[in-house]
Image (spheres, rainbow, N blue to C red):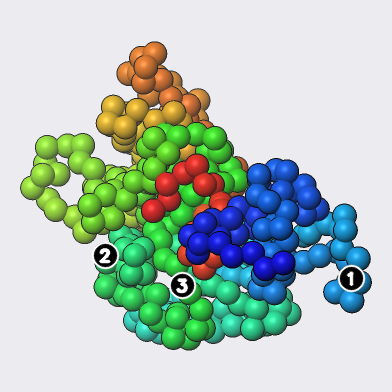
Amino acid sequence: MEVHLPSTIRRMNKEIVLNTIKDMGPIARTDIAKETGITKATVSDIVKTLIEEKLIFDEKDDADLSKRGTRLHFAKNAAFGIAVDLGGTTLHFGQFNLAGECIAKHTVATYKHQSSREFLDHMATDIKDFIESTRQPANRLAFISIATPGIVDPSCGMVLEGSPNLPEWKNIDLRQYFSNVFQVPVTVENDVRAALVGEMYAGALQNLNSAVLIGIGTGLGSAILIDGKLIRGARNAAGEIGYMLFQQHHLYTPSDKGHFEIICSGSGLEAAALKIFDKKLTAKEVFEMSVEGDIQACHLVSRFEEHLALGILNIISLLNPEKILLMGGLTQSLSLEGLNAKVGLHTTDVTDVTIEISTLQHQSALQGIAILGLKQAYPSLQYMNDKQLY
């Protein structure tokens, strides 16, 4: 029997059936009908379409016409996408299936090119090599998704204002470039915002409606979740805390890098150490010297942690989040106890907040940008349907 339904209702039912199989499968047709309230005839008709689209499969061979009681599986490995997390120090590549599972990873040092075009060409080559190394058929590539530093307009895939740690990273149409190369949908988002989505999906921010993620690495940034909605701001610049000011004289000394980022980032700490010690030190080495009692390193680390506490307190007073999550290489060196003590001096019962360090770290940006890529490439698949990601 052929079932005829108005297109909107049919599309909604199709999405319900598909996501029921994704989330609850393997599952029989009769159980889908019971779970969703959709008639058995309609379920069978939709299942036939989904099998033809290769989004699901029946555990019995197609030649076996006895389908009664057989179970349906979500075809999570029918296609894959490539997620990229662009950092000032490293590039992380991840291959994800349709269930949002990472099935392969690769990391390289950030390229030292002088032009953005050279950088993008190198990145496209590395993506092709990564796909080849995983031995996945290239025709199964369904999307590319990129998490990048800077102010990003996700609606058009443009980097509007970029990172000083990447070459010519301004007004770059990442979506157009990678769409031309790979001929698949391309999603672009700010890296810290992507990490926030990853933490919401699989990390420390699951089941929360209001939280702030602060990324402390080569640069400094944050991403904001308020009342279940990802906050981007009027021009996608919400969360650019690197430009916060703390001292009066900062008003008269504009900085492309941002005064907060100059003090409270890996690159800023290294620049300050170079001035004091007259030699190149990594941020990690500065923290290690502080632990060993070097008075000048102690001063730099103390200033770093004090300004981080100030920034967190300003965020708390403005947004009243349930949790503040810190991520980035430097967070492993921070004194979380000292930071909580400083912040706790100025919070009350209604502004008290949990401060934690991410256990996912860079994996959160890969996970988050993969989920955003999946949502763009497969709108009918549901991931965190209770959150407003766009």
- N-terminal of the pair, mark 1 or mark 3, is 1
In the image, is 133 to the left or to the right of 214? right
Which of the pair 206/381 is nearer the observer?
381
CA–CA distance in space, label 2 to label 3: 19 Å
Question: Callout 3: helix, strand or loop?
Answer: strand
Image coordinates of residue 369 in percent, x first then y, are 50, 59
For label 2, the crowd category at 10 Å Cα-Cα, with few meaning under 14, some 14 to 19 and many 20 or more, is some
> What label sits on residue 237 in the rendered view?
none
For label 3, the crowd category at 10 Å Cα-Cα, with few meaning under 14, some 14 to 19 and many 20 or more, is many
Residue for point 77% across, 66% down = 57
Q: Nearer the viewer, mark 2 or mark 1?
A: 1
Residue for point 65% across, 55% down = 17
The relative height of residue 104 versus residue 130 in the rendered view (above or below) is above
Which of the pair 170/249 is nearer the observer?
170
Return the residue found at the far front: 1
- N-terminal of the pair, mark 2 or mark 1, is 1
Residue type at tag 2: Glu
Task: Examine the image and state in which quarter residue 147 appears.
Answer: bottom left
CA–CA distance in space, label 2 to label 1: 58 Å
Q: Is residue 234 visible?
A: yes
Residue for point 40% across, 75% down = 175
Q: Is residue 261 visible?
A: no
Residue type at tag 3: Val
> What label sits on residue 161 in the rendered view?
2
Residue for point 42% across, 47% down = 388
Task: Examine the image and state in which quarter residue 190 appears.
Answer: bottom left
Question: Callout 1: helix, strand or loop?
Answer: loop
> What label sits on residue 65 in the rendered view?
1
Residue type at tag 1: Leu
